[in-house]
Image: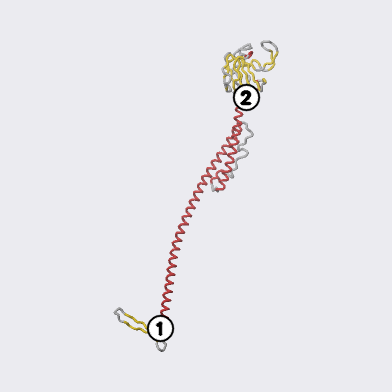
Amino acid sequence: MRLGNDSAIAMQFILINRYGTSTRLQLGPLQLGLFVILTAALATGVFYGGVQFAQGYSDQSMAHVYDNAGHIWRQELAEQREQIASAKDSANQQLSAMAARLSKLQGHIFRLDALGARLANMADLEDFDFGVDSPPGMGGPMPELQTDMEQGDLVAALDELTRELDERADKLTAMERLLMNRNLREDILPAGSPVRGGWVSSLFGMRSNPISGRREMHTGIDFAGKVGTHIHSVAAGVVTYSGRNGGYGNMVEINHGDGYVTRYAHNRENLVSVGERVDKGAPIALMGDTGRSTGVHLHFEVMHDGKTVNPKQYISVN
């Protein structure tokens, strides 16, 4: 570009081709202005086109990314929904199984109540109530426990079942203890007859002594029988005496506990020793006529708390 004398603005271009020759191109002020305008317009167009292309490409890329991301998210959500559905189905199956188990256990409680009530009735234990007047609260018929049970309902039912089982366990334990005590008491309480097949020859109380003829107190019951007849203990206990004892002759004494003592006198032979434990009905001696006696018989005494009592209120007298 150069300036003339008239201060006009001009631009000169030198174009060189591939053969080395040059061509001069000179632009005047008007042409130069047009050239600048066209150049600016071209640059603006190119820039705008590039921006539009870049924006379009960016939008297309983002749309592709969004589309891929949306597909991934939808797939992830579907998988999570499937996992949740599977977990829910598994939980429902477990709840159904637990509800069925609960229903079965409650059935056991019903049978336990029936058994407890039957035992209490057979044993005349009126203080024990096993479900007759106070059946366990189930919240509805038993089959309903197997359908659509919520977790909270199941937990509450299990807690109630635990309470009921504890209550019945306490009742059964108390009844067992009472029955054991009763059986023990029945075992140690004199009952039955010390002689099988004998007959009563003299009762308890005032009588004329068969030897002296004087009226005196007879402290037991006499059972007559054959020599060698087995004599049995009328209750379980421990032998505290076995041997000769004056007018009693051969005598066996048994302590049964709870203040009860029995004596078996005039025996031909004693079959037990001191310290030996005997069961109710066990043979302890053979019938004889040793000691102060007029014939073969058994003199049987019952003592309670150190005092002689009438055996008739405890044993069978034929």
- Total number of numbered labels? 2
Residue 287 position within the rendered picture, expressed as x and y whole percent measured from the top left: 59, 15
Identify the element where label 1 is drawn: helix
Quadrant (top left, top right, bottom left, bottom right) of the N terminus? bottom left
Tell me: residue 205, above or below residue 69.
above
Residue 200 position within the rendered picture, expressed as x and y whole percent measured from the top left: 63, 16
Q: Which residue is drawn at 63% across and 21% down?
A: 261
Nearest to the observer: residue 30 or residue 220: 30
Residue wearing tag 1: 32
The tag on residue 257 is 2
Q: Which residue is drawn at 46% across and 57% down?
A: 76
Tell me: residue 52, above or below residue 85.
below
N-term-proximal mark, 1 vs 2:
1
| Cα distance between the residues tagged 1 and 2 | 143 Å
The quadrant in which residue 137 appears is top right
Q: Residue furthest top?
A: 212
Residue 166 position within the rendered picture, expressed as x and y whole percent measured from the top left: 58, 39
Tell me: residue 82, above or below residue 252.
below
Q: What residue type is labelled 2?
A: Gly
Q: What residue type is labelled 1?
A: Leu
Quadrant (top left, top right, bottom left, bottom right) of the C terminus? top right
Q: Residue furthest right?
A: 215
Identify the element where label 2 is drawn: strand
Nearest to the observer: residue 201 or residue 1: 1
